[in-house]
Amino acid sequence: MSACAVSPERPHGIRYCLTLHERSGRRLLGFDNAHGIRDRYGPGARTRIAYDHQHVGARVRFYDYKNASSLLQDFWTEVGKILRLKE
């Protein structure tokens, strides 16, 4: 995490990228705000672009950033779920 200028893309003034990788280097989990993602479902759906998101395997979904403490807690909760599945 690092401080950045407050902007529409990063209204909380923080850049972050938290990841969990296999030994092979394949990403299993990531929480970041490095780039925008789009939400587009069905014909005529409204397009939403947000920077806060998470990667779970090949899936990408929006992440509701609240504060740095919640971000870390959410990340480690998801890491725990993934590691339990790998046991």
Image (tube, helix red, strand yellow):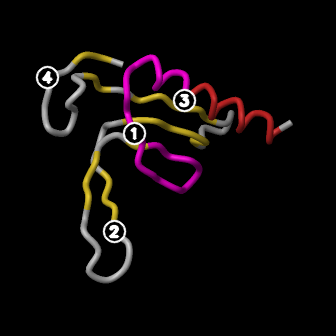
Q: Name the residue beneath numbered marker 4.
A: 5
Query: Residue 63 magenta-drawn?
Result: yes
* Upstream in sequence: badge 1 or badge 4: 4
Mark 4 or 2, which is nearer the eye? 2
Q: Position of residue 64 (x, y in %)?
A: 39, 39
Q: Name the residue beneath numbered marker 3.
A: 74
Quadrant of residue 13 in the image? top left
Residue at 46%, 36% (x, y): give it: 31
14 relative to 82, above or below: above
Q: Name the residue beneath numbered marker 1.
A: 64
Report how far apart the C-alphas of labels 1 and 3 lie in the structure: 10 Å
Q: Amino acid at mark 2?
A: Arg
Classify the position of the N terminus by image quarter.
top left
Report how far apart the C-alphas of labels 2 and 3 lie in the structure: 25 Å
Asked if residue 8 lies left or right of residue 77, the reply is left
Look at the numbered disc 2 and give the secondary structure of its residue.
Answer: loop
Mark 3 or 4, which is nearer the eye? 3
Q: Which mark is residue 42?
A: none
Report how far apart the C-alphas of labels 3 and 4 lie in the structure: 24 Å
Classify the position of the C terminus by image quarter.
top right
Report how far apart the C-alphas of labels 2 and 1 lie in the structure: 17 Å
Q: Name the residue beneath numbered marker 2.
A: 40
Quadrant of residue 28 in the image? top right
* Image: magenta residue range: 54-74
Q: Position of residue 16 (x, y in %)?
A: 36, 26
Q: Residues within 10 Å of mark 2 (few under 14, many from 20)?
A: few
- Asked if marks 2 and 1 touch (Cβ < 8 Å), the reply is no
Q: Residues within 10 Å of mark 4 (few under 14, many from 20)?
A: few
Residue at 27%, 23% (x, y): give it: 14
* Upstream in sequence: badge 4 or badge 2: 4
Report how far apart the C-alphas of labels 1 and 4 lie in the structure: 19 Å
Residue at 45%, 52% (x, y): give it: 61
